[in-house]
Amino acid sequence: MGASHLAFKSLMRELGNEPIVPPKPSLKTLNFGTRFAPEFACLPYKILLGTYVEVLEMGADTIAASGGVGPCRAGHYAQLHRQILTDAGYKFEMIVYEPPSIGYRDFVHKIQMLNSARLPLLKLLGAINRGWAKIKAFDRLEELSHWIRPRETGNGETSKAYRQTLEIIDRAESLEEIKQAEKEAVALLKSVPHDPDFKPLKVGIVGEIYVLLEPSANLEIEETLGEMGVEVHRSMFLSGWTRDNTLFDTLRIMAKGDPLKRAAQPYLAEMIGGHGQDSVGHTVLYAKEGYDGVIQLAPFTCIPEIVAKSVLPAVSRDLNIPVLSLSLDEQTGKEGVRTRLEAFVDLLARRREIKANTRLAHELGGGA
Amino acid sequence: MSSQVREGKVGIPRALFFYTFYPAFRTFFEELGATVVVSGTTTKATLDAGVQETVTDACAPIKLYHGHVAELRGRVDYLFVPRLVSTNGKLIYCPKFLGLPDMIRHSMAGLPKLIDVRIDVRKGKHEWWRVYREIGRNFTKSTWKIYRAYRKALETYRQFDGMLKSGATAPAAMYTLYGEEILPAQPGLQAAAALEQASASASEPAVASGTGRGADRRLTIGVMGYPYAFYDPYLSANLLDKLEALGVTAVTPDMIPDEVLERQADKFPKELFWTYSDRAVKAAYHFLENGRGRIDGLIHLTAFACGPDFIVNKLIELECKKQKVLPFMSLMYDEQTGEAGVLTRLEAFVDMVRRRKEAAVRAGAPLAETPVVQSQTTARTTAQAASSAKKAG
């Protein structure tokens, strides 16, 4: 997802495996995916399946995938992917990582399965730590690019610089180097000519994690919006999610419920799996923080997001914030999405203008 | 202390878990002095009303539920819309069930008071009592009264479930319990009449196959899917009645005892999370393992864009392909499904199953192990698959 594969690539290499880096999900990936996947599988399922086919064709013999405990369907994807690919005649091994909360032993054992170099525990943790540091660096850069892009003075400069920063981080190896590379990359991004005083429209992006994090699945929505002069804030980053759902999850929730759940409570009182409740909670929070609008990204047929989509109109009405829901599948075209985004952004700009005018009129009226 | 009962009409929509839990809750509410109002059998108008209240991506059963709620709105004091999380202590329900009260509350206006109790018995079977007590509090303060109603409800549930396990369909069982108040006519009766008529007037199927008729020619087909679909005459386009008219006895997952289904559990690297889906898949596996000679084919009834079903359907299809013992067809429905289209496909499938069985009987051998997997595709899917195959190639 996003740039995270670069971090996993270096981790796998350190563990003594030869990582096969899948090409960026493309039309070909989707074609493979839709050929083997059931029709109503969601977009992430099809992209993943297509990606597996691509790496298997490139000679991979092991696939590492994540599991899950539901109620979202994704918890079953790895197992079904394996069955479908086996049925299609591919030979490979699949290691499915279930969350450590169901069984630490199983989790550790499966990590050892990928530890081909038989690194001792301390070194193993070091390697994982470095991978983690890279993921955090990628996330930080991406967040920064969201801030710079709407303010850039030259068209497309930010995106160009951003792609360069990924390479800089990718080359770094030790923790020290990663730190250094991050500094360098941040400086590079900041050097993109931009106007810091520009006040762009602010849009929060919520939705299902895969389409949120993988630019090729959401048709580079952040870039598109950024280049329209909109500052986007994405509700989720991989570094945030992985931590929330593994190590500290249980502890933190035991301590006291998280603010996101509390925000969603009046609209969606149940953890319905995937990111349905998060989508609602984030929308509420964005509204309270004064964002101009919210965009919900959901793969077609995604169950939790359908539930979220059903209650979002109520949130939008109560908190007076425009919400645009986009349903993505293999047939979605970039230009179609752009048209809808333009209309949405126009609406937001107009709302802001009206608000400013009323305020002005009010002030003038008050002064007289 | 007052044990006085507050009068009230409680509406129960005839959709989703209706075909599993209605009798129990009806008894409970009535014991507490409330009147239970059920929405009518589904019509096009019911579904249309639901479509207006829901987002387009929702599946037909969810839209239909909204339609039934719309019908009850304004006619009742309470609306029973529980949040079904877990009823067997282990598995949960589809996320749409989990978010159902929220969807209803935030997308429909003019609703009566919702009884949206959260049903989750994963902490233990005593949780059922907690659930009933919470519901009962709406009607009486007397815990004793609630407890008595709760025992009665359990009794009804057992009685109803016993009828299902002995092979009755849920509508038939309800007809036995409540008569015409719940259904305009006994299910199967019209079908039987239709069958009689069919075999009396048109004898060509019998001629074509050249073998006996009537009881000898009866087939048994396992109908996989969800009770709210295969029992709903509108959603399923009268699937069960049509099968009956074609001389087929349908066996559904809710007729199979839990312990029998559980024997299939170790065949899954990971059991499905969702109660109804888990039953459907295990029932299919059970038929494939033990159905030889007793079950003649499998049909999977699935909703357009049903979330869990793409997994359920694929698992059944792959297993059928592997076992090569039973013909399999999946049948997809949505808001626009037409009776004629379903009938054509059913007739074709049943004819195929029947010829296959008769050929085997003539040969005097066990059924030939031919792989008869017929993966259902709509016209749209076929075109799509063809185009993506072309692009990929």
Image: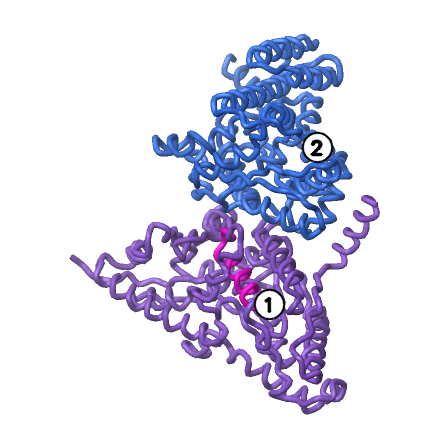
Residue B275: give x, y in percent of width and height. 48, 57
* Main secondary structure of the magenta stretch: helix
The reply to whether dot 2 and dot 1 touch (C-beta < 8 Å) is: no
Using residue B102 as the reference point, say whether residue A20 is left or right of it. right
Residue A7: give x, y in percent of width and height. 61, 24
Mark 2 vs mark 1, CA separation in Å:
46 Å
Give the magenta range. B272-288
Q: How is the image coloured?
A: by chain
Colour representing chain B: purple
Dividing the picture into quadrants, the one containing residue B127 is bottom left
Amino acid carrying label 2: it is Pro
| Marks 2, 1: nearer the viewer | 2
Label 2: chain letter: A
Label 1: chain letter: B
Which residue in the structure is indicated by mark 1?
A: B234
**Residue at 71%, 67% in the rendered image:** B372
**Residue at 52%, 50% in the rendered image:** B270
Dividing the picture into quadrants, the one containing residue B289 is bottom right
**Residue at 21%, 59% in the rendered image:** B142
- Disc 2: CA contacts within 10 A as few (<14), some (14-19) or many (>=20): some
Q: From this viewpoint, is residue B129 visible?
A: yes
Colour representing chain A: blue
Which residue in the structure is indicated by mark 2?
A: A22
Seen in the picture, residue A243 relative to A208 is either above or below; the reply is above
Residue farthest along the bottom direction in this orientation:
B200
